[in-house]
Image: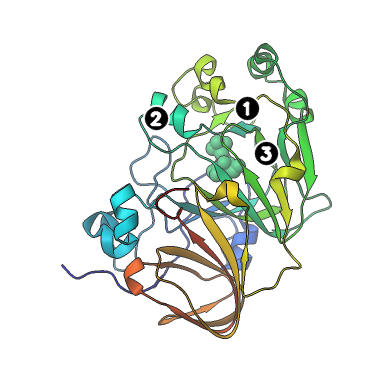
Amino acid sequence: MSSDTQPVALEANQPRQFYRGGAAIAAFRSRDDADAGPEDWVGSTTAQFGKDEAGLTRLPDGRWLRDAVAADPTSWLGAAHAAEFGADTALLVKLLDAGQRLPVHCHPSDAFASAHLGCRHGKTEAWIVIGTSGPDPTVYLGFRDDVPAAVAAGWVSTQDSAAMLDALNPVKVSPGDTVFVPAGVPHAIGEGVFIVELQQPTDFSVTLEWQGFLADPEAGHLGLGYDKALECLERRAQSPADLVRRTRALTGRSVGMFDARADPFFRADRLHVSGSAALEPSFGVFVVLEGAGTLGPVAVHRGSTVVVPHAAGEVEVTGDVVAIRCRPPSVPRS
Ligand SMILES: O=P(O)(O)OC[C@H]1O[C@](O)(CO)[C@@H](O)[C@@H]1O
């Protein structure tokens, strides 16, 4: 068996989604397929909920990344990660271009997913805003006030979109802003917001606001029924200032994107390289935001996405490059 020891440039991977968007992905990647879909799953070993293959990344040699990692987890992920997670990368990265506001939804925690969905991962996620368009790029994040369970259930059963949206904190965003979205916290990404999204490697969502988005309510509760599914909803008020960071002005060599609350789930930093920099060995998913150069043997430029196996060792980045480096949690988990 030959092991995978080099960074690999990835093509776009856009599984079908129920909402509009994708022009920003096409522009970012210099492609002319603005209608290919609003999400690009990068370095994905996760399939869409209930599907076998949609969502998985195919390597240029034709293998699914999932199969390549399963065949040699130590080369891809490193011995320490493989000892904790086996062949599970513990990471899902997406480009997401909201061409319309997404529905109000939330995601289960690890405890909920393990109790009811047979999976060790829930879906805590975080967003790095890399572009905006339109007059009012906004995200909606967490309830403004505590919401009783019966009130939330009532909104879902009557599909009161206006009440659900009005109950959330609106936050205006611009490029460089990051948003941490703990499991359970209800949210909706607004029209015109283009992000790099990091999340736990699942596609578990509870869609409170299904009408106008999903074909029917059955698609919104993970097969659990809304009574059970809504138990994962964080109904306590959230302070958005706690969850949002403005990082645009930070231009250090490696700028951390999130605070320590994200550490058990994923890591991301924005690399600003001018000349060259050697990166420590790690599995990583890279999204190049600006400039041009090389990442190991791979030529990169704005819009490039690259998956790097741990066995690539100390990869060198050269050129004038700004890139987001996404990594799984460090192990042992903090
Ligand atoms: O399918 P859902 O649960 O409505 O989620 C749509 C999208 O919203 C996100 O959770 C972002 O909020 C994406 O990861 C997901 O693909």
Near mark 1 (Cα within 10 A), the count class, few <14, some 14-19 or many ≥20, is: many
**Image height of 87 relative to 320, above or below:** above
Q: Amino acid at mark 3?
A: Ala
Sequence order check, earlier mark of 2 and 1: 2
Disc 1 CB within 8 Å of nearest ligand 1 atom:
no
Where in the figure is residue 314, as x and y percent of width and height? 40, 77
Disc 3 CB within 8 Å of nearest ligand 1 atom:
yes
Where in the figure is residue 326, as x and y percent of width and height? 51, 60
Disc 2 CB within 8 Å of nearest ligand 1 atom:
no
Q: Quadrant of ligand 1?
A: top right
Near mark 2 (Cα within 10 A), the count class, few <14, some 14-19 or many ≥20, is: some
Tell me the SS state at disc 1: loop
Sequence order check, earlier mark of 3 and 1: 3
Where in the figure is residue 295, as x and y percent of width and height? 47, 78
Q: Amino acid at mark 2?
A: Ser
Instruction: Say which residue label 2 marks.
Output: 114
- Residue 64, can we see it? no
- Residue 152, can we see it? yes
Which quarter shows the N terminus? bottom left
Q: Nearer the viewer, residue 149 or 255?
A: 255
Instruction: Say which residue label 3 marks.
Output: 188
Where in the figure is residue 270, as x and y percent of width and height? 60, 67
Tell me the SS state at disc 3: strand
Q: Residue furthest left?
A: 1
Instruction: Say which residue label 1 marks.
Output: 234
Sequence order check, earlier mark of 2 and 3: 2
Q: Amino acid at mark 1?
A: Glu
Q: Is residue 223 left or right of residue 247?
A: left
Q: Nearer the viewer, residue 64 or 89?
A: 89
Which image quadrant is residue 281 in? bottom left
The residue under the point 59% across, 32% down is 106
